[in-house]
Amino acid sequence: MNQDPAAPVSASPSAPVPESESGSEPATAGATATTSESESGLRERKKERTRTLLREGAAALFAEHGFAGTTVADIAACANVSERTFFRYFESKEALLLPDSVDLFAYVEAELARRPPQEDPLDAVCNALIAAVAPFAASSLTALTHSVAIAGDERVVAAQLVQLFADFEDRLTLMVLNRLPADTPGADLRAGVIAGAALSAVRAVLRTQRRRRANGTFTDTPPASLVLEAFAMLKQIGSTAQ
């Protein structure tokens, strides 16, 4: 029998939508991914918080008791973690001699980048370093003015400090080089001398403060004043050489 053309054609049953194309599965996957990312972010924040507490605790303990008078157990207890946890973040307490070295050196770099381009390169580097004294006086810089002798031997600690400063000196040299006119004779050597001399002056201040503490002649002269004095001597040496 022929179908009545006027009669409505029955709609065929809808084909089942594959589960992978339905809205429910992506939503579930998205929610899972979001939760996973949230948990991952929380873990990273907790790790960074622990790292910060260890750095701050070490800086405070070094400043109060000196390097030799501070143990890994002391630092861990200050951050309310175990010694085992401490070693997940740092290889030794020597790694915390400059507890905020990354921030310190980044601060100097940012300050140097802000100095006027026409400023004398040595003046620019010295002013950038001076600007970093106050913000970090209560942490790295204070810790390094204390005796760091380990069983009567400073060589282990000295090597650590030399490496930290050497790594930064390379970066500072490149920044100074970029400030020099393109036609500067021996620009790469000049940049290296400027960066090395400025950082050597800072190291001289830290060593002098440690020696003064050791022999009882230490005074409460602000670190910034000593750094300024050291840079003035450095510039005087340069002027005399000319």
Image (spheres, grey):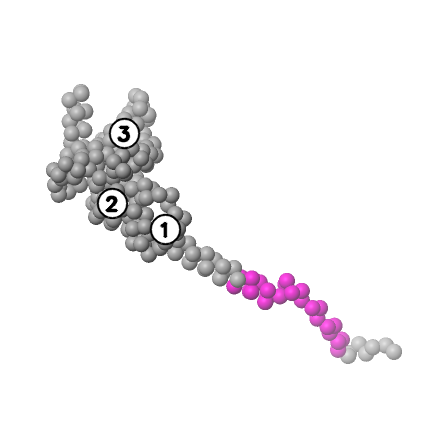
* CA distance separating discs 1 and 2: 17 Å
From the image, tell me which residue sits under label 3: 196
Task: Please give the name of the residue rendered at 86% of the width and 77% of the height, measured from the top-left corner.
Answer: 2
- Give the SS element for disc 2: loop
* Span highlighted in magenta in the image: 8-31
Compared across the picture, whether 125 is left or right of 43 comes to left
Disc 3 or disc 2, which is closer to the eye? 2
Is residue 185 placed above or below 224 in the rendered structure?
above
Of the two numbered discs 3 and 2 on the same chain, state the one appearing first in sequence: 2
The quadrant the C terminus occupies is: top left
Q: Is residue 112 visible?
A: no
Identify which residue is drawn at 24% across, 49% down. Answer: 60
Q: Earlier in the sequence, mark 1 or mark 3?
A: 1
- Number of the label disc, if any, that sits on residue 65: none
Quadrant for the N terminus, please: bottom right
CA distance separating discs 1 and 3: 37 Å
Q: Which residue is mark 1?
A: 83
Disc 3 packing (10 Å; few <14; some 14–19; many ≥20)? some
Residue nearer the viewer, 151 or 149: 151
Q: Residue at x 41, y 54 (%)?
A: 44
**Residue behind mark 2:** 69
